[in-house]
Image (tube, grey):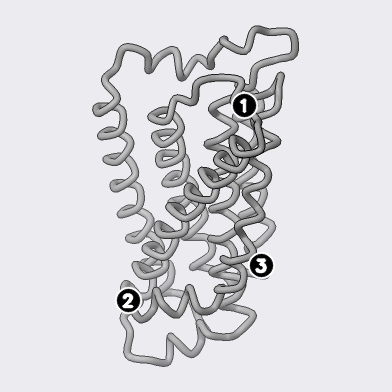
Amino acid sequence: MWGLILKDFLTIKWYIVGGFFFGIMTLWFLREPYASPSGLSAIWLLVWFIFARGLFAFDEHGRSEAIVNSLPFLKKEIVTARHLSSMILLAYAFLIMLAWLSILRAIGGYFPYTIPWVFVIATGLIAGSIGTVILFPILFKVDFVKARWITFFVFMFIFIIPLFSTLPKPNVPRQQTSSLMESLRGIPDSLVLAVAILVFGVLMTLSILISTKLYKTREF
């Protein structure tokens, strides 16, 4: 299985290296008056989404998926390996966001609010797992060319539209937080993270099960 994960990263190695510059969008989400902790979660997920789609896109472009299916791998192993690759890329996308925050600080920029990291991480994990359980079964069922626009619009609907509905409006004090953040106030950070990790684990497992079932019915 680890060989499949290594294959994924070798297939998109230059994409991963160049993908660091996707994180420059972090600076846009920190500008006033639209700065929002939700924006950081969104940019994290957007960078991850670009990488995750790349896993399927480069597989099809290089026809490596057909080769892998000709080898003695179980469908579940292929699906699980792809999910693990996605999880690693999710962590990498988070590091990219942190790197651009460090660059902003190094050039004399400032944060227009105190970043609630527990909220950012919890939101990213939950939203990322929701996106995975919806998008990955689609990508495993049909080829990427057919699914690419479907997955793109699903992503836009899940993440981008709700994001802009919670962004602070112009002339509204930036200390104002979203209703979700307000509801999390008073809850211990450890409990918030524990629930987010639990939801993440459950949905990722569900995605693997659904994707495997659909992948077994796919013809190459």
Quarter of the rendering containing residue 207: bottom left
Which residue is rendered at x = 28% and y = 33% of the image? 195
| Mark 1 secondary-structure assignment | loop
Q: Nearer the viewer, residue 43 or 76?
A: 43
Amino acid type shown at disc 2 = Trp
Taking 184 as reference, is 160 left or right?
A: right
Q: Nearer the viewer, residue 205 or 126?
A: 126
Amino acid type shown at disc 1 = Tyr
| Mark 3 secondary-structure assignment | helix
Nearer to us: label 2 or label 3: 2
Quarter of the rendering containing residue 11: bottom right
Q: Which x, y percent locates residue 103?
A: 61, 43
Density class for disc 1 (Cα within 10 Å; few <14, some 14-19, many ≥20) is few
Q: Is residue 75 above or below residue 100?
A: below
Q: Is residue 22 above or below residue 118?
A: below
Specify which label sits upstream in the sequence, 1 or 2.
2
Q: Is residue 135 above or below residue 143?
A: above
Instruction: Give me the C-alpha separation between circle 1 and circle 3.
Output: 43 Å
Specify which label sits upstream in the sequence, 2 or 3.
2
Density class for disc 2 (Cα within 10 Å; few <14, some 14-19, many ≥20) is few
Disc 3 target residue: 146
Q: Nearer the viewer, residue 81 or 92?
A: 92
Which residue is rendered at x = 46% and y = 19% of the image? 180
Disc 1 target residue: 110
Which residue is rendered at x = 43% and y = 71% of the image? 215
Tell me if label 1 and label 3 are in contact, CB under 8 Å: no
Q: Nearer the viewer, residue 131 or 17?
A: 17
Q: Is residue 134 above or below residue 41?
A: below
- What's the mark number on residue 2? 2
Nearer to us: label 1 or label 2: 1
Specify which label sits upstream in the sequence, 1 or 3.
1
